[in-house]
Image (spheres, rainbow, N blue to C red):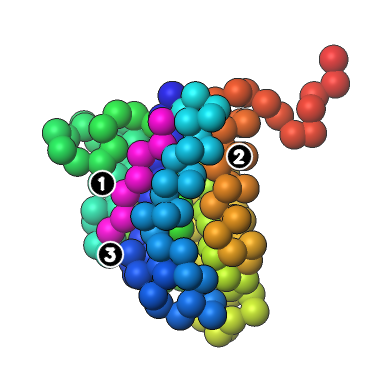
Amino acid sequence: MRILLLNGPNLNLLGRREPEVYGKTTLAELEAALARMAADEGVDLECFQSNVEGELIDALQRAGGAKPLVKDAAPASECAACVFNPGGYTHTSVALRDAIGGLEMPVYEVHISNVMKREDFRHRSMIGPVAAGSVVGFGLAGYALALRAAIDACVKGLAFPPEEE
């Protein structure tokens, strides 16, 4: 089973850009920690970051089976779910919203900072209404929370709260 970890614009600068907001952990370090977490659950985590909106859309569509896979392009196979930090595209991208809304694959939105405590323009997410869930303001731990939710729901088939028998 595979899950796509997708990161949008400027997240390649983790560890360097505004460390007081985003911390000092690099994207490579975050990806490695999450890959270990996924592997412990028998899940392959494929990681992809792009500053280009169309590349993010293509990766989502390939992961969700809506677009053919491409050799040497992420993801390498269809995915059960996606953990996605769309970065600044969160607040502006109707195209990403439409791409996610057109997939059967659940997408879990993640934001490192509490966007509701930031500038007014960050208070609206174009992605949230079509996401399976959103994790906001828990720092890099938000990625682990979203990954745990994706594994539990999409790989293990667990419901929360558990359904009564």
- Closer to us: 113 or 17: 17
Q: Secondary structure at mark 2?
A: helix
Q: Disc 3 on helix, strand or loop? A: loop
Give the crowd class for mark 2: few <14, some 14-19, many >=20 residues within 10 Å. Answer: some
Q: What SS does tag 1 mark?
A: helix
* Residue annotated with mark 3: 51
Q: Say what amino acid the circle numbered 1 marks.
A: Asp
Is 162 on the left or on the right of 110, as rendered? Answer: right
Q: Are marks 2 and 3 in contact (CB under 8 Å)?
A: no
Residue at figure coordinates x 29%, y 45% from the top left: 59
Indicate the quadrant where residue 134 lies. Answer: bottom right
Residue 102 in magenta? no
Q: Pick the quarter of the image with the N terminus.
A: top left
At which x and y percent is residue 103? 41, 38
x and y percentages locating residue 55 in the rendered image: 24, 53
Q: Is residue 47 magenta?
A: yes
**What is the residue that sits farthest to the bottom in this orientation?**
119
Residue named by callout 2? 148
Q: Amino acid at mark 2?
A: Arg
Q: Residue at x 48, y 70 (%)?
A: 24
Count of numbered circles in the view: 3
Which callout, 2 or 3, points to the residue nearer the camera? 2
Work out whether 20 lies above or below 34.
Answer: below
Q: Nearer the viewer, mark 1 or mark 2?
A: 2
Pick whichever of labels 1 and 3 is earlier in the sequence: 3
- Real-space Cα separation, disc 1 to disc 3, in angstroms: 13 Å
Q: Which residue is mark 1?
A: 58
* Rendered location of residue 133, percent (x, y): 60, 48
Question: Quadrant of the rendered structure where residue 163 is?
Answer: top right
Q: Is residue 159 among what the camera can see?
A: yes
